[in-house]
Image (cartoon, helix red, strand yellow):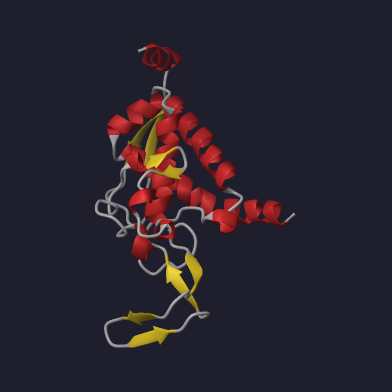
Amino acid sequence: ARDVVLVHMGSMSNLFAALGWTLVHLLERPALLEAVRGGDLDLLERCASESIRLMQRSIVLRRVLRPVELADEGTSWRLPPGVFAATFLPCTNRSALPGLDGFDPANFAGRRFTRAESLPARELVVTFGHGRHACPAQRFSITAIRHAVAALVTRFELVPRFRGPRPLRRQIGGVARADRPCPVGYRRRSSLSVTSRRQK
């Protein structure tokens, strides 16, 4: 019952944002868009996971295992073992390894982060959590994004009428919302053009 509730909550609060960013990233990259339109659903799934990684704004509660010192611009704190600290995912999702500050679907194989072995700790890059704390909505969410985006790009010619959307700067929690509207022009593609592209 808990998992069902979480799936419903996640789909209402984060699924539309994750789907939107996946579409935005594809429309900004015509070569990827054409590959997805040609039937590469594995690529689409990787794009969805990468979009979620980049736009993840969740807070994760972490337990201190050994004494650690945290510092900001003006103060430092020494945290003893047993203390819990809330961490903001964008601080490590985009900086834990070189090259994570940009969009690259090669970072994923399906839903698995391909560079996890290079991380000092796998928890430094998070999309849906880890282990028993992983979100039960992951499979549902990625599948829903895959079906919806594939249907949109195969049925319609889409023209981005936005420029450089970014995540809201002050958002804490969930998948980021865009800092501006992202309009998209569309028209139905002819069945002939869809068939011929698939055959190629």
Residue 167 x, y percent position in the rendering: 36, 59
Residue 139 visible here: yes
Q: Give the camera-side residue of 80 and 144.
A: 80
Q: Give the camera-side residue of 173 and 190.
A: 173
Q: Give the camera-side residue of 41 and 112.
A: 112
Residue 128 x, y percent position in the rendering: 51, 53
Q: Residue at image x 33%, y 27%? A: 34
Q: Give the camera-side residue of 56 and 61.
A: 61
Q: Residue at image x 37%, y 86%? A: 77
Residue 53 x, y percent position in the rendering: 40, 52
From the image, which quarter does the N terminus lie in? bottom right
Q: Residue furthest front?
A: 66
Residue 109 in the image: above or below residue 180: above
The image quadrant of residue 125 is bottom left
From the image, which quarter does the C terminus lie in? top left
Q: Residue at image x 46%, y 53%? A: 127
Residue 21 visible here: no
Drawn side of residue 186 relative to residue 4, left or right: left
Residue 24 x, y percent position in the rendering: 36, 44
Residue 190 in the image: above or below residue 147: above
The tally of labels here is: 0
Q: Residue furthest right?
A: 1
The image quadrant of residue 199 is top left
